[in-house]
Image (cartoon, rainbow, N blue to C red):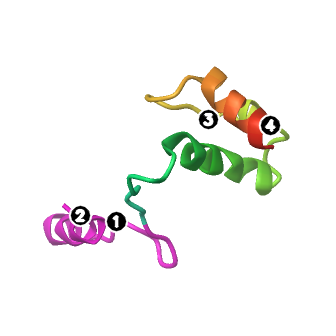
Amino acid sequence: MRSSDRGFAFAQRSGQRLWQDGYYDHVLRDDESTIAVARYIFENPVRAGLARRVDAYPHSGSEVFSMAEILTAWDAQG
């Protein structure tokens, strides 16, 4: 199911929008590195000035990647 289809189906079931205006989801392509995209997402609080490092933001975490893997990606590309 495409991401736009998921948003539409959610809206049909709940009567509410899934995404805020100006925001969207992104389906990873085969050539995209999942850890690189995760690193980008984990950097958002750092870019916003909410934390100095990804591991300092209290809401950081992943069910897929350990914090050590995320920090390795952070250190390798940061």
Q: Which one is nearer the viewer's eye here, 39 or 56? A: 39
Q: Is residue 58 left or right of residue 56?
A: left
- Residue neighbourhood size for the residue with mark 4, other residues' Cα within 10 Å, grouped as few (<14), some (14–19), many (≥20): some
Q: Which residue is mark 1?
A: 18
Q: Which mark is residue 6?
A: 2
Mark earlier in primary sequence (4, 2): 2
Mark earlier in primary sequence (4, 1): 1
Mark earlier in primary sequence (3, 1): 1
Q: Is residue 15 above or below residue 58?
A: below
- Residue neighbourhood size for the residue with mark 3, other residues' Cα within 10 Å, grouped as few (<14), some (14–19), many (≥20): few
Q: Is residue 77 magenta?
A: no
Q: Which residue is mark 3?
A: 60
Mark earlier in primary sequence (1, 2): 2
Q: Position of residue 58 (x, y in %)?
A: 67, 33
> Of the residues shown, which amino acid type is indicated by label 1?
Leu
Q: Position of residue 18 (x, y in %)?
A: 34, 65
Identify the secondary structure beneath mark 3.
loop
User: Residue at the location (71% across, 29% down)?
Assistant: 71
Q: Position of residue 36 (x, y in %)?
A: 59, 45
Identify the secondary structure beneath mark 1.
loop
Mark earlier in primary sequence (2, 3): 2
